[in-house]
Image: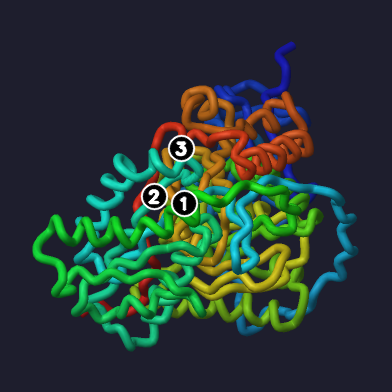
Amino acid sequence: MMAAVAAVVVHPDDTVAVIVAPQGGRAGQTLADGTPLAENVPMGHKVALRDLAAGDAIVRYGEVIGRADKAIAKGAWIPEALVRMPPAPDLAAMPRTRRPMPPMPPLEGQTFEGFRNPDGSVGVRNVLAISISVQCVAGVAAHVVERVKRELLPRFPNVDDVVALDHTYGCGVAIDAPGAQVPIRTLRNLARNPNFGGETLILGLGCEKLLPEMLRGDGADAAIVRLQDEAFHGFGAMVEGVMAAALPHLERLNARRRETCPVSDLVVGVQCGGSDALSGITANPAVGFAADLIVRAGGSVMFSEVTEVRDAIHLLVERAASDEVAEALIREMAWYDAYLGRGGADRSANTTPGNKSGGLANIVEKALGSVVKSGSAPIVDVLAPGERIRRKGMIFAATPASDFICGTQQLASGIALQVFTTGRGTPYGLAAAPVVKVATNSNLATRWSDLIDLDAGRIATGQASLEAVGWELYRLILDVASGRKTVAADRLGLHNALALFNPGPVT
Ligand code: CA
């Protein structure tokens, strides 16, 4: 007799199983409960566990992810076209009741080797950042970065890197419009990222709308260089001027050393990209497990991606640590609903063709699998886009789900390191912070063995338990944070452009 095809049922109420066998399931094979497959079913896709009539609930994670578009027989494949999407949870009518959450047992004595900053934050890298107040100066900034790498960094061996905080904002925008506060505070807080040691240099032009002074943190005395300064006669003089301004910053950064810091000083961001139906079974729960460990050790984890939590918001409101946090969660969802509405879009615009061929029928199914990255800790704070972290613990930082925008916004909110799960695969990386990439399936981890840092697909194949992979990820995070291990994206030099979230008008 043939062995049952590997499939996962997440919740006892589920009416579907998800095929996790790397080759998919073939017609005639049976699931562990004896259900015979009526047809071939690709990996990551759903199979009906009972006969469903048209309009019946399709249940996964114990939640309704849609309604059957027509009758579906037990054992049949449920492709996206047969799943009618339910409406999003009604924010106005949403119960604000919070679930009593027993305290999580603390994890004592957890440490990593980080760079302690004057403002109390702790970085995992020691990087000179050059912030720009307007895109006009980006070419000069890029030139300076190359010159500093070539000519100055060899003299400052304790400085890991130099990066320009490139962006398209700063001029040609309605600088006083209601949405403008988002990119402005994002840029200001980006310059204060813990990996920059409080030594960010600011490069401006001179006639731009966004004044370079607006990018300085409170009380910071970051040097500002303006290219229209009359002292500069031509390009060569500008470059020399910026490099001279960089020198004292490099000297101070170079004097820093890693020191043993408690994990309570670590801020880790989590996000996903190129998700598939295994995301919610393997990689995201493993990230959630590791996130719980960080929070139990007193540290902070940020999760984001509004369009991917919108359909699971009722599950997050239950976990709010206070009424204020519950209201803030709902407020950020409502703000984004209105923002999408102004653009004539809705939440269904989130899912990609890759998500769908990976087995995710719609945004409801994607969201339920996405929010498990946040583990099980109480949610202690909600940050509007670009706001800086102010409390320790599990935090919702509202950002778009777009990988590079979420990455940029989380950097502004204060992450020192990011964990990124992917099922379809992306070479995504950030220059400012290490990105630990976790594959949801072993097919991807094998095919992209030099691009992926951890294979969570072993959870689906039964080679490793969720707990084992969660602990492995937690230890990997601390190794990367301590500079003991280098992530694939940094080893290969794969770094995406920064991309600010700008909901305001462009002029
Ligand atoms: Ca994303």
Residue furthest to the left in view is 234
Residue depicted at x 72% and y 17%: 3
Discs 3/1, front: 1
Dots 2 and 1: beta carbons under 8 Å?
Answer: yes
Q: Amino acid at mark 2?
A: Val
Query: N-terminal of the two: label 2 or label 1?
Result: 1
Quarter of the image that includes the N terminus = top right
Quarter of the image that includes the C terminus = bottom left
Q: Is residue 507 above or below residue 386?
A: below
Query: N-terminal of the two: label 3 or label 1?
Result: 1
Which secondary structure lies at badge 1?
Answer: strand
Discs 3/2, front: 2
Tell which of 483 and 86 is nearer to you: 483
Query: N-terminal of the two: label 3 or label 2?
Result: 2
**Which residue is labeled 1 in the image?**
127
Tell which of 369 and 499 is nearer to you: 499
x, y (%) of residue 458? 67, 28
Q: Which quadrant would residue 382 be assigned to in this image?
A: bottom right
The disc at residue 489 is 3
Mark 3–mark 1 Cα distance, whole angstroms, equals 17 Å
Left or right: 148 in relation to 158: left
**Which residue is labeled 2 in the image?**
162
Q: Is residue 183 above or below residue 148?
A: below
Dots 3 and 1: beta carbons under 8 Å?
Answer: no
Q: Is residue 441 above or below residue 179?
A: above
Dots 3 and 2: beta carbons under 8 Å?
Answer: no
